[in-house]
C-alpha cells in the first residue's frame, strides 16, 4: 500500500488526476471506476482543465440511490453526467451508472472486462461505496439500506426532498476485483475512518478496511485526513517510511 499525504484537497485532486492521466496514456480504453461525492470533485475538475483524450475511456460508477425520479439533480447519474461525461467529452455509451439490481451491475462490469483503476471515497462511518457497516467483506453488488449517518451526510444535496433510504452499490468483493484501488480522503472529519481503515482490523464493521486485502492500493490524503493515521504511526513507531510527502 502506498500512502501519499499532500497539503490540501486541491493537491489531492491534482495528484490523483495525474495518476489517472498516466493510466489513460498507457491504455486509452481504460476502465475507470469513479466515486461520486465531494472528495473526488477536484480530481474531475483537474482532468477537465487538461486536454487529454478520454473518448475511448470507459467509466463505471460505484453506486446510485434507489427510487429517485429519473434526472433528479442529486442522483449520481446527474453527478456523473455533469462532472465527468460532459466535461471530459466521453461518449455516453461508454458510461455505466448502476441502475436496477446488483446482478445487472455485475454483468455490466463483467462485460467491460473488469475495472482497471477504481477511485474510492470513504464515509465517516468507514463505508466504502454504499457498503455500510457491517458489510460482508466478500459481498457482491446489491441493493442496501443507507445508514442514518450517510443519509444525514448526503442530505445537503437533496434540499427539501427526502433522502432515499436505499441504494444499489458495488459489493466489497466486487470492488476488490478492480486491478488498482485509489482511496482518497480529505478533511479532518475523515481522519478517524482513514486510520481505522488502514491500520485497524480488517472487519465488516469498517468496510473500507477491506482495502488492506488488495495488492495494489494507492491512498491519497490531505494533511487533515491523515492526522490520526500519522499520530498513530508515530506512537506505534510503525512503518512510517511508506508515507510519502511528495511536496516536502
Ligand atoms: C460515492 C460513494 C461514497 C462516498 C463517501 C464519501 O459514490 O461511494 O462512498 O465516496 O460517502 O463522500 P464524500 O466524498 O462526499 O465525503
Image (cartoon, helix red, strand yellow):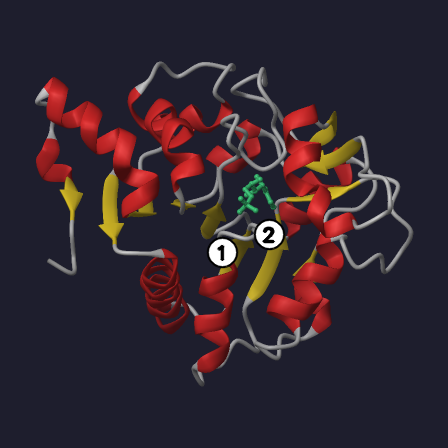
> Which residue matches tag 2?
36
Tell me residue 139's x, y (percent).
Answer: 60, 23
Instruction: Please tell me in which quarter of the rendered image ligand 1 is found.
Output: top right
Tell me residue 223's x, y (percent).
Answer: 27, 46
Q: Nearer the viewer, residue 39 or 96?
A: 39
Q: Is residue 147 visible?
A: no
| Residues tagged 2 and 1 counted as in contact (Cβ below 8 A) | yes
Residue farthest front in this picture: 160
Q: Nearer the viewer, residue 25 or 188?
A: 188
Q: Which mark is residue 40?
A: 1
Give the residue drawn at x 63%, y 36%: 170
Tell me residue 64's x, y (percent).
Answer: 73, 45
Answer left or right for 126 relative to 240: right
Q: Quadrant of residue 59?
A: bottom right
For marks 2 and 1, give the CA distance.
Answer: 7 Å
Q: Is mark 1 within 8 Å of ligand 1?
A: yes
Are there few (<14), some (14-19), or many (20+) residues within 10 Å of tag 2?
Answer: many
Answer left or right for 133 relative to 77: left
Q: Relative to residue 51, is residue 63 depicted above or below?
A: above
Amino acid at each position: 500500500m502506498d500512502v501519499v499525504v499532500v497539503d490540501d484537497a486541491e493537491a489531492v485532486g491534482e495528484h490523483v488526476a495525474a495518476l489517472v492521466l498516466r493510466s489513460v496514456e498507457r491504455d486509452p480504453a481504460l476502465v475507470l471506476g469513479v466515486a461520486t461525492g465531494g472528495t473526488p470533485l477536484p480530481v474531475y475538475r483537474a482532468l477537465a482543465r487538461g486536454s487529454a483524450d478520454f473518448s475511448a475511456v470507459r467509466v463505471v460508477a460505484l453506486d446510485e440511490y434507489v427510487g429517485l425520479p429519473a434526472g433528479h439533480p442529486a442522483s449520481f447519474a446527474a453527478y456523473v453526467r455533469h462532472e465527468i461525461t460532459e466535461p471530459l467529452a466521453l461518449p455516453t455509451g461508454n458510461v455505466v451508472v448502476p441502475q436496477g439490481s446488483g446482478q445487472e451491475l455485475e454483468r455490466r462490469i463483467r462485460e467491460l472486462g473488469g475495472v482497471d483503476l477504481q477511485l474510492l471515497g470513504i464515509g465517516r462511518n468507514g463505508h466504502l461505496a454504499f457498503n455500510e457497516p457491517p458489510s460482508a467483506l466478500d459481498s457482491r453488488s446489491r441493493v442496501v439500506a443507507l445508514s442514518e449517518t450517510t443519509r444525514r451526510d448526503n442530505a445537503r444535496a437533496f434540499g427539501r426532498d427526502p433522502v432515499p433510504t436505499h441504494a444499489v452499490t458495488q459489493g466489497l468483493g466486487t470492488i476488490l476485483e478492480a486491478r488498482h484501488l485509489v482511496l482518497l480522503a480529505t478533511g479532518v472529519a475523515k481522519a478517524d475512518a482513514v486510520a481505522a481503515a488502514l491500520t485497524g482490523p480488517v472487519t465488516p464493521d469498517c468496510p473500507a478496511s477491506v482495502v488492506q486485502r488488495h495488492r495494489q492500493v494507492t491512498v491519497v490524503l490531505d494533511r487533515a485526513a491523515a492526522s490520526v493515521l500519522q499520530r498513530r504511526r508515530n506512537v506505534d513507531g510503525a512503518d512510517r517510511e511508506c508515507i510519502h510527502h511528495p511536496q516536502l
